[in-house]
Amino acid sequence: MKLTSINPYDGSVVGEVTVTPGDQVPGVVSKARSAQPAWGAMSLSERRDALRPLGQLIEDRADEFARLITLEMGKPIKEARGEVTATVGRLDHELDAIVEALSPEQLDDGTTRSTIYHDPFGVCACITPWNFPLMMPHWLVLPALMAGNAVVLKPSEESPIVAQRYVEVLQSLLPPEVLQVVHGKDDQGKALVASDVDLICFTGSRETGKHIMAAASSGLKRVILELGSKDPLIVLEDADVKAAARFAAGNSFRNAGQVCVSTERVYVPESIVEPFMDELLKASAEVTVGNGLDEGTGLGPMVNARQRDHVLKQVDEAIADGAVVAYGHTGHHDNFVMPTVLTAVTHSMDIARTETFGPVACVITVKDEDEAVRLANDSDFGLGAVVYGEPDHASRVARRLNAGMIGVNKSVGGACGAPWVGARQSGYGYHASRDGHRQFCQPRVVSLAK
């Protein structure tokens, strides 16, 4: 049986992969478990040396990977190239950082000397989404392999070709069956979660994350979950209004809003809402919608009709409940949702509470920053948040927000080595950083009396 990848721009066939029957998934995991001991017995430096060529191998095929990303999920080609660069551009540093994080540590209190080892769990299941079809598998697969685990990757059925190419490149550097891929839809994901794996790493929706956590609980399998969000942007009275508005447009519409840290709620004080809206509408009008392969395109199609329909239904319901269209919401066609700006949005509306994952900016007028903070925190989610304002003032407001990552006058991404982490129902565990890499390991403490 074949899984066909469809270009969301024109419905053409990108390619096909072979579906892994659900009843064969346990056998795939069994092969991974057999292959793991030899890989896990290698030293950290040996595993690093084995994986170091990955960066150059992908860079040599950067145009191919970028084109496939655009074809499979619609991302503008400039952003697709950026995804390839972000994935492997600092690979040497990334590998060295993992070695440092996972190297044994020694503690000595004068009576006992303890060595803390970071050993592999065994077999790691990685289940990844379609919105960053190269970066997301890499974020999970690389540290899992470096920790000495065998890995079974189940990529999204929306972007299987990119994942397959990535796996093939990595497999050329690895012993047989240390890394394997399972293709399919929900049945394959459920079969992988239910199989004899030791660790489950998932990036995707909150609802699926809850099901995975429940299914993993019977065997107390370890889980790392990066889930959805409803990221707020707070604009303070002392903000650079033009910069804040341009960030709001860019971060609401980037990748057609299909980013886990997209700006989905914008809180603006009454005193500056008019100049802010003027700048936001100007920035929105500058977005060029079209085929992602065209160099000038700033916004491509939604990944599929189901995601398109979810976004449009949410917008239409908000309008019926009193929201006002300040820009867009016309010209939607095929899988395209046009950039849309809504005002008069309230927290009684679903669009202010449930993840949209589409190119919609929702502006909510507030009396002051206290109301903005209260409303920004009025959410089950807490992945990222952004505050625009005078830096010291904005930093104080940032400390009041219940999110894992807060950007001040910038996006949420931290300095090299900072974790990618959510709060509340946006995640369980996190990506990157020393402690993030250690999640892929079982700590073992060996102690000697002195």
Image: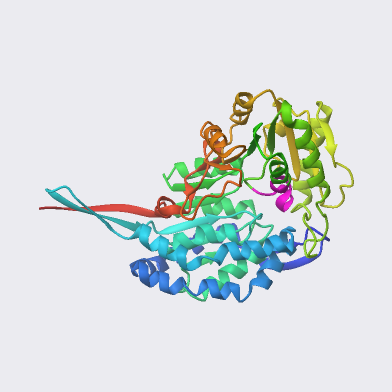
Range of the magenta residues? Answer: 250-259
Name which quarter of the figure residue 17 lies in: bottom right
* The furthest residue to the left: 450
From this view, report whether residue 92 is shown above or below residue 155: below
Along the viewing direction, whichever of 336 and 148 lies nearer the viewer: 336
Asked if the stretch drawn in magenta spans residue 258, the answer is yes
Rendering coords of residue 181 (x, y %): 56, 64
Q: Position of residue 16 (x, y in %)?
A: 70, 67
Above or below for 254 versus 70: above
**For residue 68, side relative to residue 435 (left or right):** right
- Judged from this view, the residue extending furthest toward the right is 331
Which residue is rendered at x = 51% and y = 57% of the image? 140
Q: Is residue 264 positioned above or below 45 on the image?
A: above
Q: In this orientation, which residue lies closer to the viewer: 433 or 244? A: 244
27 within the magenta span: no
Q: Which quadrant does the N terminus fall into? A: bottom right
On the image, which quarter does residue 37 sit in? bottom left
Principal secondary structure, stretch drawn in magenta: helix
Counting from the top left corner in percent of width and height, residue 313 is at 80, 38
Q: Position of residue 325 (x, y in %)?
A: 84, 35
What is the tally of numbered marks visible in this picture? 0
Q: Is residue 349 visible?
A: no
**In the foreground, 405 or 229:** 405
Q: Nearer the viewer, residue 418 or 420?
A: 418
Question: Can I make out residue 168 in this image?
Answer: yes
- Residue 346 appears left or right of 408: right
